[in-house]
Structures are given as C-alpha cells and as structure tokens.
Amino acid sequence: MASLAEREGYDVGLHLLDRQVVGADDRLVGKVDDVELVLDDDGALVPTALLVGLPALLPRFGRRLGGGLARAHRLVREAAADQELPLVVDFDLVEDVSSEVRLSEPAPGLLHRMAHERAADPRRCRVGDLLGLPVRCAALPRRSKVLDLRMTGAPGRPGEHRVVAFLVGPGRPGALFGYDRSSEPGPAAVAAVIHWLHRHARVVELGDGVVIDHEAGEVRIVAGTSLSPLRG
C-alpha cells in the first residue's frame, strides 16, 4: 500500500483505524483505536491525537453495545477510575502511514492518559463519534451514513492535517474495503462488486453546506451542496 507521503489525501477509517503504532525505535506503541479531532477556530476538524485502549475502542461499537461494554469496563476498572479514559499519542508525532502508523520518536514515554478536562472539552470529538452518523440529504438514499472521513496532510509537517470531506452513502463504515479508491489494488471482480454495492456513495467537502449536529446525532447536507463520486 502506498505511504501517506505518496498520497494527496487519506481516509481515516481505511488508513488509520486499527493499525499498529510503531515508534522510531521499531517498538510497538499500541493500536489506533480511535482518533481525536478538535474544531478549529476556522471551523475545520483537525486531528490532535491517536487514541489507544479499550476506552477508545469500545464506544465505536455503537451507542447501545458500545455503551454497555464501556460501562462494564468501568465497573471492572473501578479501582482505577482514571483508566476509564483512553491513552493518547500526539498526532504531531505521526511521521508516516502505510501498513502501520510510524512515529517520529522512540516508543518509551509517548503514551499518556487523557485528562478529564480534555475529554469534557465540547470542541473535541472522536472519529468514532462521526462514523455511522445518519446523513440527511435529499440527493442521497434515506439510510445514508458517514462511511469515512477524508484528510489531507503530509508527514513531518505538524498542524497541516485537516478533515476536508466525508464519504457518505448507504451501508456501514468499513464496508468499502478500499476498493472504491482507484489507488487501492485488489481483485478486479471484487472491486466491481464493491463499486456496484456502493454506487450511491459520494464525497462531500466540509463547509457551510455540511452541518454536524452532535445533539441530534446526525449530519445534514444542505440542498445544492456538491456531491462527488468516490475516486482514488
């Protein structure tokens, strides 16, 4: 698979989530269980951290199942209340993304526990909070969802990474398997089937026409907002 340095952009669910995180000393740091985003002053969603551990992974299973698993985890870990929050790796340390996420510094000391104040910051959310959110748009099928988040950025240039678009359409997050992107190799027959199954999926650039309503638990796309076919 091409590295992040060889791409104009990359998709969080496909290229980041569930990949191993390796330090500059080739030691395993952990696994990307989620990615923290912060709403910048200009309205952009900016990745700030890789999140590691069950407190980051379990909520991705959905509100009902994920919530129940997270509550069970908190009960089991009652003696260590601070461990209800995930471990954090600063996103600025990401040097490259290929079959693994490689960091610019050695592994020891890179992980730290998320502070409660940070977790409660209303400007912050997680990729897992957005994946699967219902999408309300007259130009899309009724059961459309957020399938993935597209980011731009280059390794070694902190602060340049931005979420620039959502991949939206019917189905579920993770079901695209990368075959919708022309740059992802794979069996032609499988790619054709995936293309047909997700023929209604589209890319919508973030902006005034896209409203993320966390309270309502949905994304609304204003009529007339440009929706592009999926491309690599």
Image (spheres, rainbow, N blue to C red):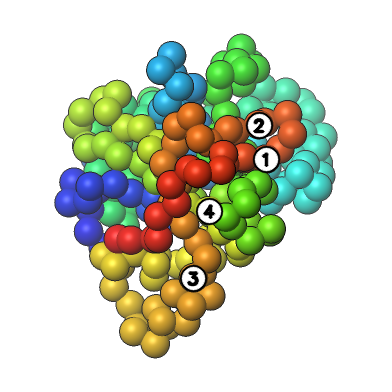
* Left/right of residue 85 with respect to residue 98 in the rendered view: right
Q: Callout 1 environment at 10 Å: few (<14), some (14 to 19), or many (20+)?
A: some
User: Which of the two labelled residues, at mark 2 and mark 1, occupies the earlier sequence position?
Assistant: 2
Residue at the location (62% across, 51% down)?
138
Please, what secondary structure does the residue beneath circle 2 have? strand
Q: In this view, does 151 lie above or below 194?
A: above
Q: Earlier in the sequence, mark 3 or mark 4?
A: 4
Amino acid type for the residue under numbered disc 3 = Arg
- Most extreme residue toward the front is 224
Mark closest to the chain's N terminus, 4 or 1: 4
Mark number displayed over residue 218 = 1
Q: Mark 4 points at which residue?
A: 168
> Residue 135 location, x and y as percent?
63, 48
Q: Which corner quadrant holds the N terminus?
A: bottom left
Give the spatial CA distance, label 4 vs label 1: 12 Å
Per the rendering, the mark at residue 185 is: none
The amino acid sitting under disc 2 is Asp
Labelled pair 2, 1 in contact (Cβ < 8 Å): yes
At 57% across and 29% down in the image, what residue appears?
Answer: 125
Q: How crowded is mark 3: few (under 14 residues within 10 Å), some or many (20 or more)?
A: some
Q: Residue 199 carries which label?
A: 3
At label 1, the amino acid type is Glu
Q: Can residue 230 be seen in this view?
A: yes
Q: In this view, does 185 lie above or below 30?
A: below
- Cα–Cα span, label 2 and label 1: 5 Å
Residue 183 position, x and y percent, is 26, 65
